[in-house]
Amino acid sequence: MQISSRFTIALHVLACMDTFKDEYKVTSDFLSASINTNPVIIRKILSQLKKAGLITVARGTGGISPARPLSDITFYDVYEAVDLVENGELFHFHENPNPQCPVGRNIHGLLDEKLRAIQEAMENEMRKYTIDDIRVDMQKLLEREG
């Protein structure tokens, strides 16, 4: 199991959006250079962030901006926007465990509640961090590099 790179790319996008907002128009081409990935991937993620109400996108080369305060955009909001899990379940269970095997017959009962608790813990932890946290940390790093 691995969370898609779309999540960290989206966080990178939002960090760039804030860091460069006063110097550049933050466009998909600009972002793709920073992230070192294809602009098509960036546009897809921008579309997902926009659909989730996290950013606004100006047509053409207008750039992107936050749709709400950075302190109101959590990592969970970003994760939910770009990394939708199948049927709301982070862990994809193998489809047909053998009912003739005592483990296969009981594996769902053994794991379902535990896996759900793990997912809830991860999601609750993601709700603790915001894009504003990234902004503050980025400012500190830039001041040290200064």
Image (spheres, helix red, strand yellow):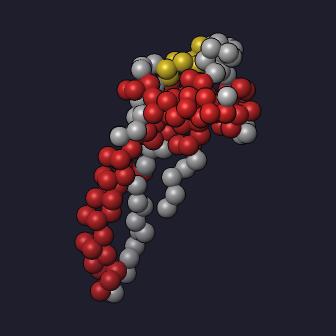
Most foreground residue, 113 or 100? 113
Quarter assignment of residue 67: top left
Most foreground residue, 34 or 141? 141
In the image, residue 71 above or below residue 115 = above
Quarter assignment of residue 107: bottom left
Q: Residue at x 33, y 63 (%)?
A: 115
Locate residue 118, reporting x and y percent: 33, 59
Locate residue 41, reporting x and y percent: 65, 37
Q: Residue at x 67, y 33 (%)?
A: 145
In the image, residue 52 above or below residue 57 = below
- Looking at the image, residue 12 sits to the left or right of residue 95; the answer is right
Indicate the quadrant containing the C terminus: top left, top right, bottom left or bottom right.
top right
Locate residue 86, reporting x and y percent: 42, 51
Locate residue 96, reporting x and y percent: 40, 73
Q: Residue at x 42, y 19 (%)?
A: 68
Most foreground residue, 7 or 105? 7
Q: Residue at x 58, y 47 (%)?
A: 5
In the image, residue 116 above or below residue 64 = below
In the image, residue 120 above or below residue 18 = below
